[in-house]
Image (tube, rainbow, N blue to C red):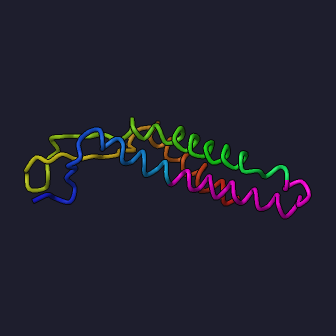
């Protein structure tokens, strides 16, 4: 009996789900970017790549990618809002989880995220 816009997971999950989704997406972009740099280095500097590209360094870079992704994604927890009494089209009250980008800082956040994680890696 749930409506499409109804959020049944509560306030905590309203903050957590967008955070996890964006963190995974951004970590994927950073990991692929790191792999691309490593492959470029292995091709352009093959003699140095043997001792520069190590498992330990790869592990540190992967952990750093996830940490940076989580750090840059953390503002989404402030932007996302849970409202337990939103009015549905038929007049009934339903809980909703919304991400509004109507003010200055949320717009800046989304523009920064698009620039850092999608436009910049294309260059």
Residue located 43% across and 52% down the image:
21
Q: Is the N terminus in the top left, top right, bottom left or bottom right quadrant?
A: bottom left
| Depicted 7 relative to depicted 15: above or below | below
- Was residue 68 drawn as part of the magenta stretch in this picture? no
| Point 17% across, 44% down: residue | 86
Residue 38, by quadrant, is: bottom right
* Rendering quarter of residue 83: top left
Residue lying furthest front in this view?
A: 55
- Is residue 70 shown to the viewer in this render? yes
Q: Residue 108, can we see it?
A: no
Q: State the residue at coordinates (36%, 43%).
A: 16
Q: Nearest the camera: 49 or 77? A: 49
The stretch drawn in magenta includes residue 29: yes
Q: Residue at x 89, y 53 (%)?
A: 48
Q: What percent of the width, then of the height, locates residue 91?
A: 7, 51
**Most prominent secondary structure in the magenta stretch?**
helix
**What span is colored magenta in the figure?**
25-50
Q: Is residue 26 left or right of residue 84?
A: right
Residue 30: x percent and y percent? 62, 52
Q: Residue furthest bottom?
A: 43
Point out residue 8 in the picture as x, y percentages from the top left corner. 20, 49
Total numbered labels? 0
């Amino acid at each position: 009996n749930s409506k499409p816009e109804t959020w049944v997971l509560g306030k905590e999950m309203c903050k957590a789900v967008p955070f996890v989704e964006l963190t995974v997406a951004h970590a994927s972009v950073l990991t692929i970017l790191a792999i691309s740099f490593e492959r470029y280095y292995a091709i352009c500097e093959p003699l140095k790549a043997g001792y520069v590209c190590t498992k330990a360094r790869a592990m540190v870079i992967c952990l750093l990618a996830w940490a940076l992704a989580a750090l840059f994604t953390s503002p989404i927890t402030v932007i996302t809002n849970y409202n337990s009494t939103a009015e549905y089209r038929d007049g009934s009250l339903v809980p909703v989880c919304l991400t509004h980008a109507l003010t200055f800082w949320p717009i800046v956040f989304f523009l920064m995220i698009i620039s850092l994680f999608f436009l910049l890696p294309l260059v």
